[in-house]
Amino acid sequence: MKKINFAALLLIISIFSCQLISFAAPTAEPSAQEETQNSPAPSDSGTDEAAEASPTPDANTFPEPRAKAAMLFDLNGGRIVYESHINDKVYPASLTKIMTALIALEKGNLSDVITVSDTALADINYLHSKIDLKAGEQMTFENLLMAMLVCSANDAANVIAEYIAGDIPTFVDMMNQRAQELGMLGTHYANPHGFHDENHYSTVSDISIVTREALKNSKFCEIVKTKTYTIPATNISKERLISSTNHLISRYRNTYHYYPYATGVKTGSTTEAGSCLVATAEKNGISLLSIVMGCDNQDQKENAYSFTDTTAMFEYIFNNYKSVTIASTSDVVSDSKVYEAKDSTRVALSPSKNVVMLLPSDYTAEELSVQSNLIEEINAPIEKGSVLGNATYSFRGETLATVDLLAANEVKRDNLLHFLHALGRIFFSPYVLIPLLIIIVLLIGNAYIQYKKRKVRRRRMKSQRPTVRKSAYSQNQYSRPRQTRSSSSARRRTPDRSPSGYRDRSYNSSRTDKSYRSTTSRYGSASSRTATRRPRQKPPEDPWDKYR
């Protein structure tokens, strides 16, 4: 029994120890609870931090471009406003130079002076756009970039490629590797300038990716919005005046398509690729990126679709939409109770970044909603800035943006409450409760079995106890009734005792009264209980008394 109890105690201690270790480790609770509410009144100003935004414009009124593939992108909101065949294979023509410029700006030094080589000019002919560089001519890297991006000089692109990689094929490999890094899965480059090659292709989606990456570089943005630029004289050539091929930003070549809100970027044109244009424009806090590929421009005015259709898309958005800041990092979207928080402190939740949406000008605040999705149980302690869920912003039932929700304040833990909860979780865990119940049942069963064994043993001992028969003397009908006296009195007044105080064995043995039985039981002496005194009898007469 003792061994069983000791083993059970050891088992309980080991289970509790394992549970303490397991509950000490933090646990993540990814399930979410949803809460939908109307968003606070938004402001109409844009911000530098972007989130997904912009509802789809009305297809019945939006001026769709006459192009093989096109896209209109909200740069502030980070969302496509309009798209058409954006994943179809197209020839990028001189839009290739955006990738060439991106790699060159990442690896080159603007003040370096570069010497033009014969190999850089080997594949340049009269069909190429160029600034007539000569072998041995020296020009700074910055001026070569201006020539390549402003007036789309193919010879400048080759010289830059050799300067960066040592030779043109190695630079082309760098272009393809960089495209893979950016996720441009539908693109393959065969040269650094974009002159037609069957193995040189891309997609509108990929061109959007590389353009947005290049626009992060301030020097690139400065160059692509340059209207005219004078390249200083070199060791071989006089100074050169170059002008932008993008008629949206410059009146130098064509005054018909000038658009005052345009800020860049690059044109491209070959017989196979058609007329292509990547353009950016800004107005009233709205920043847009337009890409049209494969346009069939008929003239330099109203039928130059790459320019007119791009301008029409810009004007439609600027006139019918506005950039709205739905939420900022300083806003409190909601608050929540914190489990085991000290002093019952609640945690406030704010967006991880500013949320900007491109919304119709006639929108109302009731059409906006935000849905908070928090982790099921927020446990203390919580550090400021911890991610506790996310918020989904919608407009007219259309999901526009999802951002993380961060703790706006710190919440400390109540250590006593945490300890009590840990004990409760351990005790009521099925890994503890079930074995504990099994052990209790086994102990109760064992105790019951031992009780039954003791009961059977007592019954067996009682059945084996000898029966004390009544003495014949007590059954004599002529005997006098028994008188109960204490054992001490019985010993004192009994005449059949010897002077020493003990019974006279010879006298007792000579008695002929067979009814006499000792009052001493086999289970105890007469001194331990009340003895029954026998009636007095006259001692036998001594025949010698008469002679005395």
Image: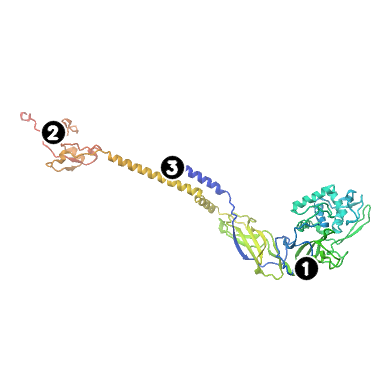
Q: Is residue 441 magenta?
A: no
User: In the image, is 525 to the left or to the right of 207?
Assistant: left
Residue beneath disc 1? 315
Element at label 2? loop
Element at label 1? helix
Rendered image quadrant of residue 474: top left
Amino acid at dot 2: Thr
Rendered image quadrant of residue 377: bottom right
Residue beneath disc 2? 512
Q: Quadrant of the C terminus?
A: top left
User: In the image, what residue occupies the spot 53% across and 54% down?
Assistant: 417
| Magenta region, residue range | 1-5
Label 2 crowd bin: few (<14), some (14–19), many (20+), radius 10 Å? few
The image position of residue 473, as x and y in percent, is: 15, 39
User: In the image, what residue occupies the spot 75% across and 51% down?
Assistant: 181
Name the magenta segment's main secondary structure. helix
Rendered image quadrant of residue 131: bottom right
Element at label 3? helix
Considering only order in the chain, which callout, 3 or 2, is on the residue closer to the N terminus? 3
The image position of residue 498, as x and y in percent, is: 17, 32
Residue beneath disc 3? 5
Of the pair 223 and 79, the residue shown nearer to us = 79
Q: How is the image coloured?
A: rainbow
Q: Nearer the viewer, mark 2 or mark 1?
A: 1
User: In the image, is 116 to the left or to the right of 46?
Assistant: right
Do the numbered discs 3 and 1 sit on residues whose CB atoms are within 8 Å? no
